[in-house]
C-alpha cells in the first residue's frame, strides 16, 4: 500500500517537501514505516530515528499497525514553549 | 481553554479570566524569546505547529491538569509564526483556591507542553542563519 | 524592586519589566481575594502594614532571591487598604534565563512573604463582621 | 525606663490604642518586655505570646537587650499575601 507522511519543521526542510509517499506491505507497523521513509529519503534518517509518528492527532507506538486511512505525520523532537 | 494564535498573546485577558472569586492564587507563566543562548545571538524566533494535533494535545494537557489539581481556571496559548525578542511565545495561566496547586499545575503544564506538543521553534541568528530546533530527548527544553 | 501601594496593582507594568531579552521565562504570582473560606463568605479584605519594616523586609527578600537564583528581574508589590473580591493583594514577578529558576523564586518569595513581612489582613464577612487574621505559626498562609 | 510599643492590626484592636507604654528595668530583654506588656494589658496576652517584637525594621530575639532609643513594635502573626 502507499502511505503519505506529512513533514514539519526540520524534517520538511531536510526532505525539501511538505510530505513524502512510500510503499509498504499491507501488514506493516510504524517501525517498518520508519525504515521505508529512511530508505526513500536518507536525509530524514536522524529525525526519523529521534522522532515519533502520529496518526490523526495522536502519537502511535512503533509496534502498531499502520492505518493508511489516517493522516500520518512524522513528528521530529518538539521545541515549543 | 487552549488556543494557537498568530498574534501577540493578550496576557491581560488571561489574568482577567483567571482572577475569579473562587480563586486565591493565580500563576502566569510566559516563555519568551531569549536573546542569547550561550554565545549565540538570536534576533527572533518563529514557530510552526501540526495545528490540529497541537490543539488536541494541549486540550489533553488542560484536562489532565484540571483532574490532577483543583483549578478554577486553566488556559494555555501558544503563538505561531514570528515572535520578536522579549515577546511571549507561550502563556499558561492557572488559578486555584490555594497557591501550591496553581504553581504545580503551571510548572507541570509547561514541562509537558515542551515534551509532547507538536510545535517547533526556528532560531533566527544574528549572523543571518536559521535553524530548526529538534532537541535530543534528555536535553529538551531547559527554558 | 518592591513597593507598597494603595492602588490596584498594575500587572501589565510588572510583566513588561520582566520581559527582557536576557530572560527566557517569566513567572507572575498573584494572591487574590477569595470569596469563600470553608463556608464563610468574604466580601472584601483590607490590609495594613508596619510600612517601613515591611519595605525593609521585602527588599531583603528580593535581594535574597537574586542571590539564590539568576534572576533577570524580580519585583514584589503588596497592596494596602481595601481589596475587593478577585483583585490582587500581592503580585510577585520573576524572570530568568531558564524556567525552573523563575518558578522556584516566585514560590519561595510568596512563602517567605507570608511568614515574615509585617502585613496583616482583615476579613470583612458577608454577615457584617470583621476579623484581623493572625494565623498560628504552623497553619499560616495556606493560600 | 519607659518604652513605647507600636501596635498593629488585632493587637491595636485588642488594646484599643495605637501604642502602649510600659516601665521596665534598664537591663531588660524582650522577654521581660513581653511580660510587662501582658501585665499592663492582659487583652494583648495571646498576640504577645504568638508574636514577635521588632526594633526599627528588624525582628529581635527575646534574649536581646531592649534598646529604648529604637522604634519598638509588637508584630503579631502576619497574614499578608
Image (cartoon, coloured by chain):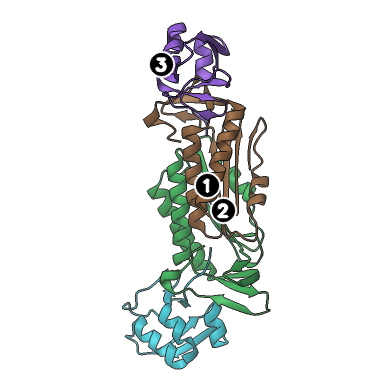
Chain colours: A cyan, B green, C brown, D purple
Seen from the viewer's position, the closer of residues D78 and A27 is D78
Looking at the rendered structure, which numbered label has been put on residue D46? 3
Q: Position of residue B5 (x, y in %)?
A: 62, 61
**Residue shown at the point (41%, 70%) measured from the top left:** B138
| Distance between mark 3 and mark 1 Cα atoms | 33 Å
Residue on which disc 1 sits: C65
Q: Position of residue D58 (x, y in %)?
A: 53, 30
Residue on which disc 2 sits: C71
**Contact between labelled residues 2 and 1, with CB atoms less than 8 Å apart:** yes
**Contact between labelled residues 1 and 3, with CB atoms less than 8 Å apart:** no
Q: Residues within 10 Å of mark 3 (few under 14, many from 20)?
A: few
**Residue shown at the point (53%, 41%) measured from the top left:** C61
User: In which quarter of the view is residue A60 placed?
Assistant: bottom left
**Residue shown at the point (34%, 78%) measured from the top left:** A62
- In the image, A64: left or right of D7? left
**Contact between labelled residues 2 and 3, with CB atoms less than 8 Å apart:** no
* Above or below: residue D29 compared with residue B15: above
Looking at the rendered structure, which numbered label has been put on residue B69? none
Dot 2: what SS?
loop
Query: Same chain for the residues at labels 3 and 2, yes or no?
Result: no
Q: Residues within 10 Å of mark 2 (few under 14, many from 20)?
A: many
**Residue shown at the point (61%, 66%) measured from the top left:** B80
Dot 1: what SS?
helix
| Distance between mark 3 and mark 2 Cα atoms | 40 Å
Count of numbered labels shown in the rendering:
3
Q: Position of residue B118 (x, y in %)?
A: 49, 69
| Distance between mark 1 and mark 2 Cα atoms | 8 Å
Seen from the viewer's position, the closer of residues C21 and B91 is C21
Chain containing mark 2: C
Dot 3: what SS?
helix
Amino acid at each position: 500500500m502507499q502511505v503519505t507522511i506529512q513533514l514539519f519543521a526540520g524534517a520538511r526542510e531536510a526532505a525539501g517537501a511538505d510530505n513524502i509517499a512510500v510503499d509498504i506491505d499491507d501488514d506493516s507497523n510504524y517501525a517498518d514505516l520508519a525504515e521505508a521513509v529512511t530508505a526513500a529519503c536518507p536525509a530524514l534518517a536522524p529525525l526519523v530515528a529521534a522522532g515519533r509518528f502520529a496518526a490523526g492527532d495522536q502519537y502511535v507506538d512503533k509496534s502498531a499497525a499502520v492505518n493508511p486511512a489516517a493522516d500520518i505525520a512524522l513528528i521530529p523532537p518538539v521545541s515549543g514553549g | 481553554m487552549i488556543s494557537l494564535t498568530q498574534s501577540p498573546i493578550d496576557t491581560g485577558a488571561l489574568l482577567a479570566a483567571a482572577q475569579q472569586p473562587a480563586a486565591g492564587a493565580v500563576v502566569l507563566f510566559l516563555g519568551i524569546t531569549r536573546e542569547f543562548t550561550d554565545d549565540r545571538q538570536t534576533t527572533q524566533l518563529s514557530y510552526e505547529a501540526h495545528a490540529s494535533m497541537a490543539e488536541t494535545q494541549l486540550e489533553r494537557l488542560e484536562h489532565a491538569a484540571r483532574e490532577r489539581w483543583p483549578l478554577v481556571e486553566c488556559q494555555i496559548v501558544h503563538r505561531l509564526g514570528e515572535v520578536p525578542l522579549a515577546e511571549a511565545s507561550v502563556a499558561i495561566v492557572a488559578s486555584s483556591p490555594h497557591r501550591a496547586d496553581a504553581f504545580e499545575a503551571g510548572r507541570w503544564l509547561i514541562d509537558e507542553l515542551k515534551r509532547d506538543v507538536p510545535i517547533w521553534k526556528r532560531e533566527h541568528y544574528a549572523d543571518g542563519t536559521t535553524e530548526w530546533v529538534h532537541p535530543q530527548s534528555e536535553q529538551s527544553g531547559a527554558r
